[in-house]
Image (cartoon, rainbow, N blue to C red):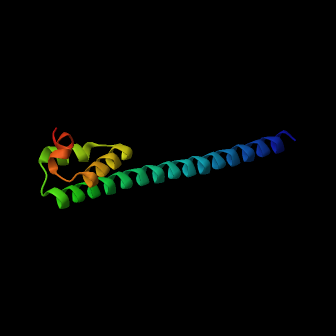
Amino acid sequence: MSDEFDQFAQMALDEARHSGYLEGHADGLQEGLETGLQEGTLLALRAALLRMTNHRFGSTSNSFRLRVASENRAGQLYAWMDQVMSASRIEEIQDLLSP
């Protein structure tokens, strides 16, 4: 009877390990997808901001491009896009363009 119990306990332990592995794998996959979506969104926002600024005011400085590339907050990138869209002259966004 002890052997049957040991086999049952081992089967339960194996099942728990497998279940834990699957759960961990699913959690890791979900986290990876979320991170990828966030990074992709930031990349698209940065590209759109640079394109908008170049289209409206001509080429931009390296310091501006670096500032945009290093920004990791989508809200800030959207705010800068709003500034670029509402500005009628480049002087109106000098604070954005300066380092």
Expressed as whole percent of the image width and height from the top left, the position of residue 47 reads 27, 57
Question: In this orientation, which residue lies closer to the viewer: 71 or 75?
Answer: 75
Question: In this orientation, which residue lies closer to the viewer: 99 or 88?
Answer: 88
Left or right, 23 with respect to 80, comes to right
Expressed as whole percent of the image width and height from the top left, the position of residue 69 reads 24, 47
Q: Quadrant of residue 17?
A: top right
Image quarter in which the N terminus is found: top right
Expressed as whole percent of the image width and height from the top left, the position of residue 78 reads 35, 49
Left or right, 52 with respect to 73, comes to left
Kindly give the residue lying farthest to the right in the view shown: 1
Left or right, 35 with respect to 5, comes to left
Please report the residue visible at 27 percent of the width from the left and 55 percent of the height from the top. 85
The vertical placement of 90 against 98, above or below, is below
Question: How many marks can you see?
Answer: 0
Q: Quadrant of residue 8?
A: top right
Image quarter in which the C terminus is found: top left
Please report the residue visible at 20 percent of the width from the left and 54 percent of the height from the top. 88
Expressed as whole percent of the image width and height from the top left, the position of residue 61 reads 12, 48
Kindly give the residue lying farthest to the bottom in the view shown: 55
Please report the residue visible at 81 percent of the width from the left and 42 percent of the height from the top. 3
The vertical placement of 36 against 96, above or below, is below
Please report the residue visible at 15 percent of the width from the left and 56 percent of the height from the top. 57
